[in-house]
Amino acid sequence: MDLVSPPVEALGQIDSWGADTAAAGVVRDGEVVDTHGPRDAVVRWASVTKLVTVMAVLIAAEEGTVDLDEPAGPEGSTLRHLLSHASGLPFQPGMPSSSPERRRIYSNVGIETAAEHLAAAAGMPFERYLAQGVLEPLGMRAQLNGSPAADLDGSLDDLLLFAAELQRPTLIAPETLAEATTVQFPGLVGVVPDVGRFDPNDWGLGFELRDGKSPHWTGTRNSPRTFGHFGGTGTFLWVDPDAGHALGVLTDREFASWALEAWPRLSDAVLAEAV
């Protein structure tokens, strides 16, 4: 993945964010356009991990190891409910907060339950399935060191390899990715953590969808078709199919109000340069 000129000057904004480690990169149509900051520094991706976990589940679904609409999780829930935060499970372990398909309840435990379901169906630890199915085929050196919802450790190079896969899928069919980035269970109300309550709070299969949400952690220039995720360690990845660009950022500064100012500003500046 060689850099393509001209450079994206906006990426230099990350130097002012107050993080000890900050790295960012832009991918256009499956190729890296530019990066800023250390490409090989390994940081915890936090909830961006969910996207890689979901990719493993989608691969398993295509292989026939699991079915997205088979029972999984609490009573009445399916694997599809778990991946789209519609199972009723709470954020942390505990009893369901509601019945499935009633509200969009952002849930780490839902993603963890989906990973456990896949591991049981595949007859191997989820970490191994993830490595063999996603990380190694893409050339990623990232490693899962804990929760499938939050504990992937990897570098910017790893993140950009994954971003390129989301633009030009090789591990799954384009139709499968299209389904994963389409609203699942439309009309559910819910909260994007630390951003706000939305009605509806649209979500795909693990991918948070920008749609008409405002305010949002992506930029005002991002199209409604933008999908991705952000993490509590100051990390994010979005892919904008209309613009043909993806932006990935890794930092070691904990998510807070600073990010809801800095991230949209960076996203808008990157897309302005892309015009």
Image: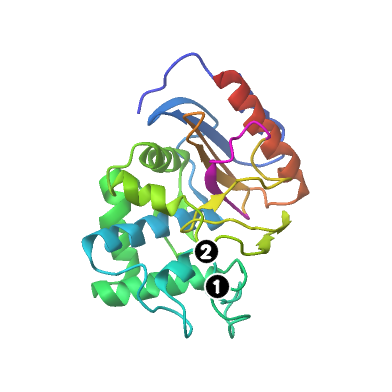
Q: Which residue corresponds to the image point at 22% horizontal and 61% vertical from the top-left?
A: 63
Q: Which residues are magenta?
A: 220-232
Q: Secondary structure at mark 2?
A: loop
The answer to whether 40 appears left or right of 238 in the picture is left
Q: How is the image coloured?
A: rainbow
Q: Which residue is mark 2?
A: 185
Where's the N terminus, which quadrant?
top left
Counting from the top left corner in percent of width and height, residue 240 is at: 51, 36
| Residue 72 visible from this viewpoint | yes
Q: Report which quarter residue 119 is drawn in.
A: bottom left
Q: Could you tell me the amino acid type at mark 2?
A: Phe
Q: Which residue corresponds to the image point at 43% horizontal and 40% vertical from the top-left?
A: 163
Near mark 2 (Cα within 10 A), the count class, few <14, some 14-19 or many ≥20, is: some
Q: Secondary structure at mark 1?
A: loop
Q: Report which quarter residue 68 is drawn in.
A: bottom left
Indicate whether residue 118 is drawn in magenta.
no
Q: Which residue corresponds to the image point at 77% horizontal and 48% vertical from the top-left?
A: 257
The answer to whether 262 appears left or right of 170 in the picture is right
